[in-house]
Image: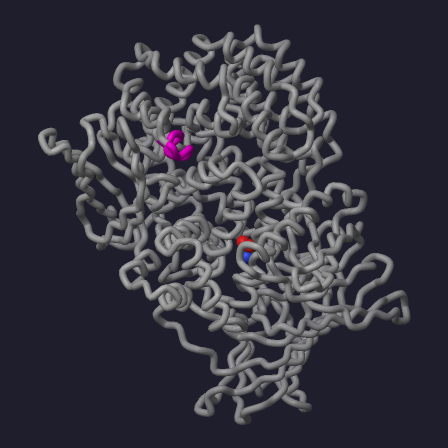
Amino acid sequence: RSVKRLSDYQPPDFAIDRTDLTFELDVDKTVVTAVLELRRLDPQVSELCLDGQQLQLLSLHYNDSLMADDQFDCRGHQLRLKVSENNFRLTIKTQINPQANTALEGLYFANGSFCTQCEAEGFRRITYYLDRPDVLSVFSTTIIADAAHFPYLLSNGNKVEERPLSNGQKLVCWQDPFPKPSYLFALVAGDFDLLRGEYLTRSGRLVGLDFFVEKGQSGKAAFALDALKRSMQWDEQRFGLEYDLDRYMVVAVDFFNMGAMENKGLNVFNSKYVLVSQDTATDTDFFNVESIIGHEYFHNWTGNRVTCRDWFQLSLKEGLTVFRDQEFSRDMGSATVNRIHAVQVIRTAQFAEDASPMAHPIRPQQVMEMNNFYTVTVYDKGAEVIRMLHTLLGEAGFQAGMRLYFQRHDGQAVTCDDFVQAMQDANHYDLTAFRLWYQQSGTPELTVQRHYDAPNQRLTLRLSQQTPATADQSDKAALVLPVRYQLLDTTCSPSGLFVMQKSSDTLVFDGVSAQALPVLLEDFSAPVRLKHDYTEQELLRIAKEAANGFARWDALQSCWLLWLQQTMEQASDFVLPDALFELYQQLLSQPLDDKALTAELLKVPDYGVFAESFQQIPVHAILSAIDSFRQQICQRLAPELQSCYQQHSAAAVDYNEANVGLRALKNRCLDYLAVQGQSSESLLQQQYGAANNMTDKLAVLKACLNSSHPAFLSLMQQFANEWQHDVLVLDKWFSLHAANPTIAVFEQISLLCQHPKFSWQNPNRVRAVFHAFAMQNPGQFHRLDGRGYQLLTDTLLKLDPINPQVAARLVTPLLSWQRFDSKRQALMKEALHRLSSQQGISDDLYEKVSKALA
Ligand code: LEU
């Protein structure tokens, strides 16, 4: 199996100036004719080598002559032919089978529609091509299909022709004026409902906005349409960037491997991230729709207008675009809570990836299957790296860097270095040392030691950083760490930014009292693990006094880690401190203005947060500590929880910051009250019955699940009866069942797989069941009899031939076998060996499994 390396990059030998595609769509025999105008860039080169996979070549013409079989070589995943001219035309006719394409890469037929997904390397499943992001071409696309079944025939750019053909067929032709790499190509054909809107750009151009959704669902796209308008306006205001085509189309499909795709002028979305209504979607779903609509829209500049030179540079577009979507979300809702959620992703999923066999820098150095590198490291840590640049340069400096970046590189395929260089040049700020963030993997540890010199009223902080070795790299160097701080003191509490450049450094405060307490890494100003020796009292003081909302929450997180340690040492004797109950009492009786933040402060961290603080994860000790914490809170604060619940139970139904906060706070209370078991039943039933929105309904089910409440199964039955018809809602029900922490889950999952709406071909359904089981049911997944690992392995063996990309994502929890005790290690390794010895395992799965076993 072959591995590609960043260091082997070579610029392309040929340019493709024009790409004219014709699709004669047919469910199992689609014929694609590609006419490519090629230009040789290096006259020394005598061979052209095009990528192609799963294609049946029907004919090949060089200019006007038909090539005989011995005039080219078409084996494996390549088409090679000798060339002697500098300019020539190739006409390639291939046949593909969209219906058999269950991998959902390239052109596939599912649920009655044709749809494409080309990023990263799906275009080579459509025709032979230079399928690499640094080959930009002007595309035209002609689509011919049965008019009755496929009234909408869509592709990138502007529609230039539409006419009926004989025999009930129809032809539509599209032209995209912007040169683009093949990964941004898209085609969709189907019968949809269409929701239309428009947006007037700041320069006065009217843009048509078209949402294509499953029949009968257009009402559920209204929020996404509004979110798109907000994204367009926000990008004009904050980044000065305007949309560049006359039409922006979004298609929502239920069969999709990822979240969404930014194809030029024709985004394709997983329906889960378009279709929402109050009765079917939670506040989290609404949030995700808005942020992903934003993400794909923002890609039009950061991704499409300026794209990646090669796939190792993926973070160039994804890290930057996640940063942009996070900033957008921050302006649309609670800034602090959004930051908390983004940081949780880093601290749980991203730090876990650093500690796993798949550890890689935000710009990976070698890749077997590119699909395996659409990771939380490339995306979310990538966004943290951009955020640090923003912190170092300030908003004005960052925007100056963005302007220079577009001025230099609009229309080009570039590298992460080009981006950093633009930031550096626009600000005359030396970022040489900063660039290490792009090549070094791992989670830096920042240790702080305090020294107070009473006679001189001087507080000295000794900071030292160290990044532990990762699976991919043993030697690590010091990174540039922007440390935002506030010094809590008796009279005044100064704040500032300290930029740490070396492996150790000191930060000195003069004229401060013995009570001075530094709050470090406000807003998580660098993606590091902070190691400190703060006491519970000091942390609780930060939780009460810090100006920064994130820092207050963060201090409580540190407290929870202390309490977990103490629980594990003292077992059932450990009692949470009175100071916590006092703080909670206060928060319940007088919540902050930001109710969503209040709800976060009142939360016992999830399993994943606790787990990440251990080298070797004590699964059951964590789970029983969480149970004990929840019980103590419920016992001590039941009346306060009750009255806070009552006071905040009357949120209006619409999705907006205030209502979201009210629901979050009320449902946090409910979640604790459910611990009371039977005596909370009427409250739970009452909320379930009265709820006019999915957030409140689902909160009841989750509260029951978290507390093993006896009402769980009957409410689940009721829910199933109500929502049989709606697959996206049913996915929630699948996930809740799969997260059931009792042994009954195994029986339940086998029933779910026989459910009429379950399908092994549909990634949303598969993930609803198995992602929930493997990631949200640690107790059963990590059973000591190995049944959990076995179930996941059986599933992967079945799924890999159907959809390797989805299989490779699901294997993640098995990779981290080194994080568990020896008994589990043996069981997990056995599972990995079963996978690796499977005949014909995909590159996707093989890359991960072989790294884990190396
Ligand atoms: N570029 C997409 C995104 O916006 C990912 C793709 C692989 C579907 O994240």
Which residue appears farthest toward the top when viewing the image?
679
Residue 549 painted magenta: yes
Residue 662 in sight in this render: yes
Most foreground residue, 663 or 68: 663
Image quadrant where residue 87 sits: bottom right
Residue depicted at 69% across the width and 50% down the height: 252
463 lies left or right of 177: left
In the rendered view, would you say 456 is above or below 56?
above
Residue 51 percent across, percent down from the top left: 54, 72
Q: Give, as a single range, the part of the protein colored magenta.
A: 547-554
Residue depicted at 49% across the width and 31% down the height: 776
In the rendered view, would you say 506 is above or below 137?
above
Residue 5 in sight in this render: no
Residue depicted at 30% across the width and 45% down the height: 483
What is the chief secondary structure element of the magenta stretch?
Answer: helix
Residue 283 percent across, percent down from the top left: 61, 34
Most foreground residue, 626 or 756: 626
Residue 388 percent across, percent down from the top left: 37, 51
In the rendered view, would you say 725 is above or below 815?
above
Residue 68 painted magenta: no
Residue 438 percent across, percent down from the top left: 35, 58
Most foreground residue, 182 or 741: 182
For ligand 1, the image quadrant comes to bottom right
Which residue appears farthest toward the left when viewing the image?
455
